[in-house]
Image: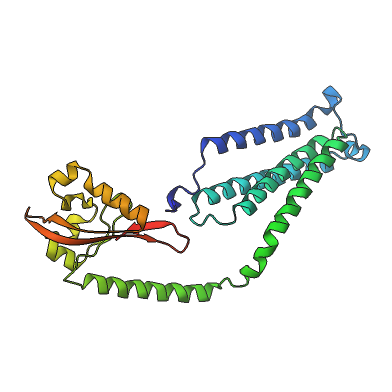
Amino acid sequence: MIRNNSFWSTDLGDLRLLSSVIIIAAGLAWSGCVQSSSGFTPHDSILQQDPMLLWTKILSNIGIAAACFALFVALRHFIRYRQNRSHPVIFRLLGMLLIAFVLLHLMKIWGLYQPLYWTMASIEACTAAIALLGTIAFWPLVPKTLDLKGSEEFENVSKKLRESERHFHLLISGIKDYAIYLLDPQGTIMTWNEGAERINGYRADEIIGKNFACFFRPQDREKNRPQLELEMAKKNGRHEEEGPRVRKDGSQFWADIIITALRDDFGHRKEIS
């Protein structure tokens, strides 16, 4: 499940990395303030004569490096919390490219004071290689983007989907001869239909949020039977059996049970029915 409520939370590693980048950038920028006392001056004579140009270059490179780092953090969280984990190579290359840009622009600040030609050339070569690999990996996906729906078409599809879900829930809730309900992977009851209420005796507000183990006899719960049935359904996709179950009032009845693991289009298990 995508945890939207914590998507923008920043962990300790992000804060440490951000602090390191800020300290390095601030140190490089502050070095421009000690030109007269230390003799640490730009190697370009034009920059020596024009402090405004020098600081424009320093602050511009700090801004670009900070923006690239922020994009890297956002990309990292996007990869961590997104549900569809296809095309991981492209996202890794993009993250490497953003970090390369951070290093490149920080070194450009240092390069204003020291002519680090080979160091700069090496970083630029690595950045170019990563960018080229990313382009090669992304190019086959370009035709697929043409099939993406526009906002208006997407809204129409979403509206139809909501109506379809509403009709489906009305259909399921109106079935009186069969108990049909959804469980999460731990066995917690998520939905409840009229048939389940009639057969088991629980109202929806009484049972939703509880574990379906309450339908098993005490001796079956001691043998961990509810969890075993869930595991068999997860492993095989479906589990079917006949056995005793317990109603709200404590009476028992013989039931034909079918437990099905429901998956999305990407094969990820979502719920259990």
Give the residue at x 83% y 36%: 119
Q: Locate residue 146: give its quadrant.
A: bottom right
Front residue (pair 156, 96)? 96
Q: Is residue 203 visible?
A: no
Q: What scheme was used to colour the molecule?
A: rainbow
Q: Position of residue 61 (x, y in %)?
A: 75, 43
Residue 84 seen in the current view: yes
Say above or below: 185 vs 19: below
Nearer to me, 35 or 272: 272
Q: Quadrant of residue 167?
A: bottom left
Residue 239 image offset from top left, x and y in percent = 29, 58
Residue drawn at x 79%, y 32% as measured from the top left: 32
**x then y, percent, for residue 171:** 26, 74
Quadrant assignment for the C terminus: bottom left
* Viewer-closest of 18 and 75: 75
Residue most extreme to the right: 45
Task: Report the residue at 70% width, 54% height from top.
Answer: 134
Number of numbered markers? 0
Q: Residue at x 71, y 35 (%)?
A: 25
Residue 126 or residue 69, whichever sits in front: 126
Give the x, y percent position of residue 78: 54, 51
